[in-house]
Image: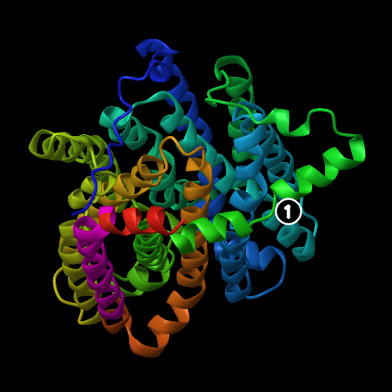
Amino acid sequence: MMAKVDFSTDNDDIYKRFSPGRKVVITMVLVWSTFQCTLATTTVVSAIPEVSSTFHTTEAVIAVSNALMILCQVAGPILYAPIANTIGRRPVLITTNAILLAFTLGTALSPNLPSYFIFRFLTAPQVTANQVISTVVIGDIYPAITRGRALGWMMVSTTLSPGLAPLIGGVIVNYVSWRVIFWVQTGTASLSVLLLAILLPETIHERKTHLFADLSPCRKFKKFIRLMDPSEIITLLLSSPGLLVNAATVATLHWNQYSLLTPIREVLNPRFHLSSPLQAGLFYLAPSAGYLTGLLCGGQLSDWVVGRYIRRRGRRVPEDRLNSTVGVVGIGLPICSIIYGWVVQKAVGGIPLVVVALYLQGVFQVVAFISLNVYCVDVMEGTGKSSLAVAGSYMVRNVAGAAGTAACLPAIEAMGVGWFMTIASGLLVIAGGLLWLATRRGEEWRIRKEEKS
């Protein structure tokens, strides 16, 4: 008979260190910080032709640079998550935002293509570091039963930005130089550094600075380097079936999101005989509205499902949260993706049908992302490894996002948007099946792992 594992720590005093009002302030600061960081990834998507013209290269080269930037984001969790887990969240968040500010300014001033590439790539790790550590801060201050709602608001950055950023970029490049995009981002990063420095307290439950006590400077440096070893993140991910299923699902969602958003200008402008970047940018309003809707209801749905299973079982099991995502990932998103792909491929219906499909995909993606992100914190609660679990998830998702960004245009040109979205839908159905399996077997997997260790 399987032993019962009680993950309930919701009454611990550790979650009462900050008043409800202070928690709201912290959450709003994180919302702004992660929002402006995520803008750095996709704002320039609508300005690819203008950037390529400035540097006398092809649009494909600039598109690939954006994909490589997303791939470089993998370095963020590897570099910063172990540090935040040791010395605290606050210094790392302030540092990554300050570095982002400096490299964004460098991008705005880039005199040639190599310098543009270098500054873009150096910006990338700061983006994911900010996303990962902000997620962990939410886990530091909110108990599991209300964590989904809080993370839903914090995730306004990672979900709303990919849809809203190209619209902002399209508006800017329609009237002024593409360099203004990065001047604006320099200003938003400056505000973020200021807000973090003034309003963000340290939230880590226990610093591990004692690891450096009584060590010589040389040995402290060696210890610090060992802390940045990514093997612990990878080992944690591979040794936990629940986290592995979660990461695979997140990767599939990220592939779908970026392969849908990246080619909107190239796919929809010819379909509807549009010409300007601003007209293409307006299509991003549909998924952005969907993201906002998902943010308003996804966190509440996630927490409601957890509460429902607690009342039914009398205790909390982390995998219960995944029940809110199975149908969304395995049924809702595949249907919307197929409709969008073949409506565009066959040129049937008009703009309203495309807009509705984009909107619903936005809703479903966010509802799924919220529960999947919170699960990483839930399942590692009390172990001190929540930041590593979240880091592993972001590592995988950014590889998938980079692959989707790089592959979508060549694949669509080769097979058509209909078949491309059909394949993406098939991957989502598989991910939904894996999630369903995790909801049924996840607790058993964890107990078996504990018995072996």
Can you give x and y, in whole percent of width and height, for residue 319 in the image? 26, 49
Choose between 287 and 323: the one closer to the eye: 323
Q: For mark 1, what is the residue?
A: 119
Residue located at (17% from left, 71% from top) = 339
> For numbered disc 1, what is the local secondary structure?
helix
In this picture the colour scheme is rainbow
| Residue 112 belongs to magenta span | no
Q: How many labels does the image show?
A: 1
Choose between 174 and 178: the one closer to the eye: 178
Q: Is residue 37 left or right of residue 343?
A: right
Kindly identify the amino acid type of the residue bearing the numbered disc 1. Answer: Phe
Choose between 376 and 265: the one closer to the eye: 376
Q: In this view, does 401 lie to the left or right of 64?
A: left
Q: In which quarter of the image is residue 428?
A: bottom left
| Residue 427 belongs to magenta span | yes
From the viewer's perspective, is residue 351 above or below residue 287?
below
Q: Is the magenta stretch mostly helix, strand or loop?
A: helix
Bounds of the magenta segment: 422-443
State the quadrant of the N terminus. bottom left
Q: Quadrant of residue 206?
A: top right
